[in-house]
Amino acid sequence: MIEFREIRVSDAQMLLDWRTSKRVTQFMNTDIEYDVEAQKRWLQSCYTRPDYYHWIIRQHGRDVGFVSLCDYDPAAGTASWGLYIGDESATGAGGRVPPYFYNFAFGELGLKRINAEVLYHNTRVIDLHRLHGYRFVPGKDRLIEKNGKELLLIALELDAQTFFSGRFTRYKTPFPMTHWQHRPQQQPAA
C-alpha cells in the first residue's frame, strides 16, 4: 500500500541521507552539500513557497521516498514534479507512485498538464513516463552541467485528458497539505 505524508523538519537527516546517496544523486539535476542544518532551513522554507510542496512516500507503513510538486502554476494549470525512492529495499515502489500523484495533480488540483525532465541515461524512468502517457517535447530538451560534464535533460509532458483516458485512474490516495501556507483550494475529484 502506497500513501503520502507531509514532510516535517525532523525528516531532514533521513532526506539528506537519501538525497546524497550515490544511487539517488546520479539521477538528480543537481547535487547538494551534506549539511543537516541547511536541509532543515530548506524544509522549513518550503511551507511558504507558493510554487512548491513535497511529501514522504510511505509503503506498508514505512517511509521509503520523496515526491514533490514543483513550478506549480494554478493559473496556467501546469506543474512539474519529481520523486525518488530513498530506502534501498523499496526501489520497486518508484514505479507504483506516479499514478497516485497524477490522480492528485489532475483530479484534486485541477492541473491540465504535468511537465517532467529526466536525465537521458535514466531510461527506466523515461520508459515509465511513456507508459503513463507522456509525450516527448524535444524543443524543451536542454543541457545541464553536472560534475564537470554536460548532460542532456529530456523534456516530457503529460496532459490530463491523456492520463484520464488511460488505465491508471484507479490509484487514488490523499496528499495532505495542512502545513503548506499557499495550499490551493482542492478541486472536486474527476
Image (spheres, grey):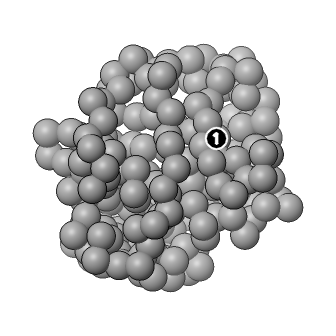
Observer-nearest of 180 and 108: 108
Where is residue 186 drawn, in percent x and y? 30, 36
Q: Left or right: 166 with respect to 88?
A: left
Residue 147 point in image, percent of width and height: 62, 56
Position of 76 relative to 43 (above/below): below
Q: Report the residue that reaches farthest toward the left.
A: 75
Asked if residue 48 lies left or right of residue 98, the reply is left
Q: Quadrant of the C terminus?
A: bottom left
**What residue lies at 78% left-to-right and 45% top-to-bottom?**
61
Q: Specify the quadrant that holds the N terminus.
A: bottom right
Query: Where on the picture, by quarter, is residue 9?
Result: top right
Q: What residue sits 57% from the left and 39% below the top?
A: 55
Q: Can residue 22 be seen at all in this image of the molecule?
A: no
Q: Position of residue 105 (x, y in %)?
A: 35, 50
Q: Quadrant of residue 164?
A: bottom left
Q: As displayed, is residue 128 above or below residue 80?
A: below
| Residue at the spot of label 1 | 56
Type of amino acid at the residue the image marks with label 1: Ile
Q: Which residue corresponds to the image point at 33% horizontal and 45% vertical from the top-left? A: 108
